[in-house]
Image (cartoon, grey):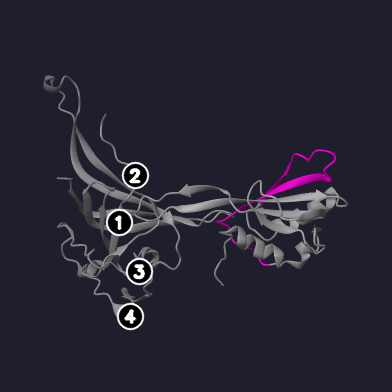
Amino acid sequence: MAQQFPTTAQAIYDVLAADTTFTGLLGTYEFKAGQQITAISIVSAGEDMPALRNVSGVECIIQDAGDFIKSEYISNDAARLTVNWSVFLVAWEPAKGADLQSAAERACSRFLGSQAVQTVATADGLGSLVQTKIMIRSDMPILAA
Amino acid sequence: MANFSAAFGYDFYIVPVQNSLVTDFSSAPTVDTATPVDAAHTVAYSNGIFTVNSVAFTMDGTDDAVRLSGLTSASLETDTGTEDIYTYDDATSGFNQSVATTKSFSISLAGIADFGDAGYKILRLTEQNTVADGLRVAFKRVGPTGTTEEIVGYGTLTGYTESNEVTSIVSWECTLTGYGPYHLTLQA
């Protein structure tokens, strides 16, 4: 079977959303209309979730734009683009850091060469305890669950 | 400001040949780059003969060239062997005289491994069977972009090194050691 690569944010979403072990570690979005769904989304940086009333548990935010580097060839071939995708995991109450850790480890287990780093905790009062940034390389393959 | 060129836009072609089917290694080979082997063509090899896209190569240097893609290096290195003359007289003020006696060249190739690419397959099989089936390659390098400088000649693929550290892109290096002279055509 050919190697599959996470070349888009949608590809990362599809892998994580289909991983029941991972989604089992996530919390929920509650919308103003009352519906609840698993807290995983693709967003542009700074974009708000529409009509969102509440987030609880571990939230997974996949940014739809990443950093990238070009690897050139001396032959007349198109450069190879390596995108470094950012996926943020945020622990909202009642989730704890351990829940975030479990979700981050599971997410990283699906992408070869991925790594995670804890970023600054959100200010008190917002309900978020801690967050982790997962970096996923577009030139490393998706791993089987 | 002096003109300069970025190391980009080289085309490097090889044509596998059987040593016994080429009689003249001193003249420049005619490397047919008009219709190079398609990267997606199938490659089979048996008893010193390539079969590409179900067509058997003649292996005498007249087959279609194959372009090596994904190259990160294709640098020419030459060397000159010398003999020192010592006259022990005053004419050279005691200095020796170094006389050039031999020339040699090699080309260091490097690239990423595209396992489905016909050029990669032909390179690997030619290098593997260099000794067993007496294989060499005719080669042609043109470039970089913006210049027509080209070198052509014959060589033997000696030494293949792959790099496959975990979480890296699989890449390779191969040395083409010259067999006879290389022929240089500089930009007009």
Q: Secondary structure at mark 1?
A: strand
- Name the mark nearer the viewer: 3 or 2: 2
Label 3 close to label 2 by CB (< 8 Å):
no
Q: For this rendering, which residue is in front, B52 or A20?
A: A20
Q: Secondary structure at mark 2?
A: loop
Give x and y (percent) for residue A139: 55, 56
Q: Which residue is mark 3?
A: B132
Tell me the quadrant of the picture where the C terminus of chain B can be found: top left
Q: Chain of mark 2?
A: B
Q: Which residue is mark 2?
A: B7
A109 relative to A98, above or below:
below
Check residue B36 in the rendering and tell me which mark sits there, or answer none: none
- Name the mark nearer the viewer: 2 or 1: 2
In percent of the image, x 78 and y 41: which residue is there? A122
Check residue B12 in the rendering and tell me which mark sits there, or answer none: 1
Label 2 close to label 1 by CB (< 8 Å):
no
Q: Chain of mark 4?
A: B
Q: Which residue is mark 4?
A: B54
Q: Chain of mark 3?
A: B
In percent of the image, x 29 and y 61: which residue is there? B14
